[in-house]
Amino acid sequence: MSSSPPPAATSPQDLEIKDAQLIFNRVWKQLEAELGREKLQFPKELILLGGAPGSGKGTNTDFIRELRGITAEPIVISQLLDSPEARKIKAGGGMVGDEEVLRLLLKELLEPRFRDSTVLDGFPRTKVQVECLKLFYDQMIALRREFAGTPQAHLFRQPTFHIMVLFVDEAESIARQLKRGREALEHNAEVRKTGVGELWEERNTDFDPELARNRYRTFKEKTYDALVSLKQIFHYHFINAQASIEVVQQNIIRELEYQSSLELDPRTYDSLRHIPLADEIVQHARQELVKRLDGYQVEHPELLSAVVDFIQGKMMPIIQRYAVSGRAMINTENPLFRQGIALAILIDIFSERGFRASVDIHRQEIPERFDLSTGKIETREKRVYRITILFAGSKIRRG
C-alpha cells in the first residue's frame, strides 16, 4: 500500500505573497464597489521615499517636490495612521495592519490634488506591503489598457514609480538622532519661555542612544530590505546621505533627471525618439568643432587665413567697443563671404574662441543699366552680411 508524499512545506515568502494577494484583492474590490472602475484614477508618478533615521527625509522632501514640480503635499504614512479614520479603527478595538494601511493609502491617492504626482513617505515598510505595491502597479497598467481608446484614456496614464532611499550608516544615524533631540529640547524650552513659536516633536528615540540604535536596526532589517527588493521592478535611486546637504541634493538631481524613455508612454516615445537629445549633440560638439577647424587648415588654408585677417582687422575693434553689453552687430559686403564655406569658418572660429556668432544675409537688387530699346533694367545683387556676435559682457558695479 503506497502512501502519498507529504505536502511540500510552505515558505514564509509564499505565505507573505498569498497574504498580500488576499489583502490587496479585498481592498481593491471594495474600492471598485464603492466608486466604480472609471473613478480609480491614481497619480501618474509616485516617489516612494525611504530613509534611515536621521538621513534627512524631512529636509529633502520639499527639495524633491520642487525639483519635480509637485505642488501636492507629501503623503506621510505616520500621519495617515493618525487620521480620524485610523483613530476610529483603533477606538473600535481594531488594529491598523497592512490591510488598513493599504486601504487608507489608496483612498488618499484618489484625492484630485495627487492626480499628477506625489511623494510617499513610509510605504512600503513590510514584505506584504511590497507585494501589494506590485499588485497596485499591475492594476494601474490594467486600467490603462482597459480605457485606451476611450474618451477617458487621458485619465489613466502610464504610471511611473520611483523608489528613493536616503542612506546613512548606523553611527551617523545615531549621532543625528541624538543631535535632533538636543535641538528639540533647546527649541521647546525657548518656546515655553517666550510663548513664541511652535513646539517640536520630542521622540524618545532621540534621547536614548540604545533606542536610537534599535530604531536604525529596525529600518535596516525591515524597511530597507523591503525597498531594495523593488530594485529590479521600478526606478531605484540609492542616495548616500552622509555628505553635506548640498552634495546630497546634487545627487538627488542627478538621480531624478528626466528620462523620456522611462517616463513617456511607449507610443509617445516611439514618435519622438528619432529626434536627437540636446545632451547627445552637445556631448560631441567640441570634438566636431576641432575636426572642422583642422580640416579648414588642411583643405582651405588661404580662405581660413583671409577670414582670420578679417576678424582681427575689421571685427575685433568693434567687438571690443561693445565689451560691456556683450553684443555686437556688424554689417559687411565683403565678397569673401560669397564663398559659403567662409561664413562657416567665421562662425566656427568665434565658437572656438567662446563667442556665439550668427549671420543673416540681406539681398537687394541694385539697378545698373537701363536698355532704352527694350525697357529692360539690368541689376546686380547686393549682399549685406549682418553678423551678430554674443558673449559674456563686462560685470560693472552700479550704485
Image (cartoon, helix red, strand yellow):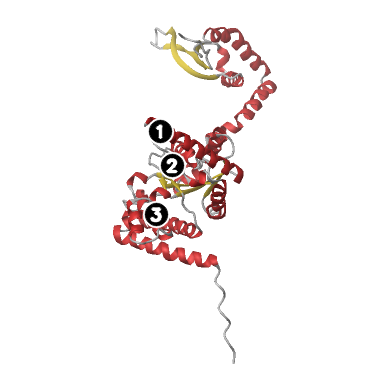
Front label number (2 vs 3): 2
Tell me the kind of residue under disc 3: Arg
Which mark is drawn over residue 300? Answer: none
Evaluate if marks 2 and 3 touch, with contact meaning CB atoms under 8 Å apart.
no
- What percent of the width, then of the height, locates residue 183? 49, 36
Q: Give the mark, 2 or 3, whose residue is nearer the N terminus.
A: 3
Evaluate if marks 3 and 1 touch, with contact meaning CB atoms under 8 Å apart.
no
Query: Badge 3 is on which residue?
Result: 144
Badge 1 marks a residue whose secondary structure is helix
Residue farthest to the right?
298
User: Left or right of 128: which side holds 25?
Assistant: left
Label 2 to label 1: alpha-carbon separation: 13 Å
- What percent of the width, then of the height, locates residue 376? 40, 12
Look at the image and tell me in which quarter the N terminus lies. bottom right
Query: Badge 2 is on which residue?
Result: 201
- What percent of the width, then of the height, locates residue 353? 61, 18
Label 3 to label 1: alpha-carbon separation: 51 Å
Q: Residue at x 44, y 34 (%)?
A: 189
Tell me the kind of residue under disc 1: Val
Query: Badge 1 is on which residue?
Result: 191
Instruction: Examine the rendered structure and indicate whether residue 124 appears above or below residue 203.
Output: below
Q: Give the mark, 2 or 1, whose residue is nearer the N terminus.
A: 1
